Amino acid sequence: MSNDEADDLIFKALSHRVRRRILDHLKAEPRTTGMLCKLFPELDRCTVMQHLNVLEEAGLVIPEKRGRERWNHLDALPVHAIHERWIGPYAAYAAAMLSRLKTGMEVPAG
């Protein structure tokens, strides 16, 4: 899979608010699918599983079978890669521009 295809899967996974909320919960600690279902009473188990499958396909969730339970772990590395590619360079550019503006404003008029 190319980097662009992997990025597409990540952006698709992050595009839905329920999936982002699932990741927020997993950020705190791994949870079983049952635990996640209880956190989303408005959704049936099948819908939660579908969202988890999208997150797993994007590499954002790593499932672990323990007996009859499926534990879901957050893998933040794909999000970090997106940050490095898309956000980091723009943030550095914006910081440099603000620094130049500050320096320009501090120069006394002669």
Image: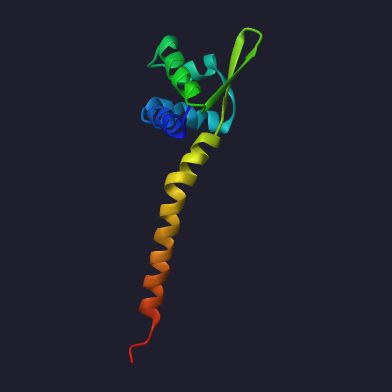
**Closer to the camera, 94 or 17?**
94
Q: Name the quarter where the C terminus is drawn.
A: bottom left
**Closer to the camera, 33 or 6?**
6
The x, y position of residue 87, in whole percent, is 43, 48
**Closer to the camera, 66 or 57?**
57
In this rendering, position of residue 25 left or right of residue 4: right
In this picture, is 63 found above or below 85? Answer: above
Quick one: which residue is furthest to the bottom in this view?
Answer: 110
Which residue is rendered at x = 41% and y = 76% of the image? Answer: 103
The x, y position of residue 85, in whole percent, is 46, 45
The x, y position of residue 70, in whole percent, is 59, 14
**Count of labels in the image:** 0
| Colour pattern | rainbow
Question: Image quarter for residue 67?
Answer: top right
Which residue is rendered at x = 43% and y = 15% of the image? Answer: 50
In this picture, is 38 found above or below 74? Answer: above
**Closer to the camera, 90 or 5?**
5
Quick one: which residue is furthest to the right in this view?
Answer: 67
Which residue is rendered at x = 46% and y = 40% of the image? Answer: 82
Quick one: which residue is furthest to the top in this view?
Answer: 68
In this picture, is 103 found above or below 13? Answer: below
The x, y position of residue 105, in whole percent, is 36, 78
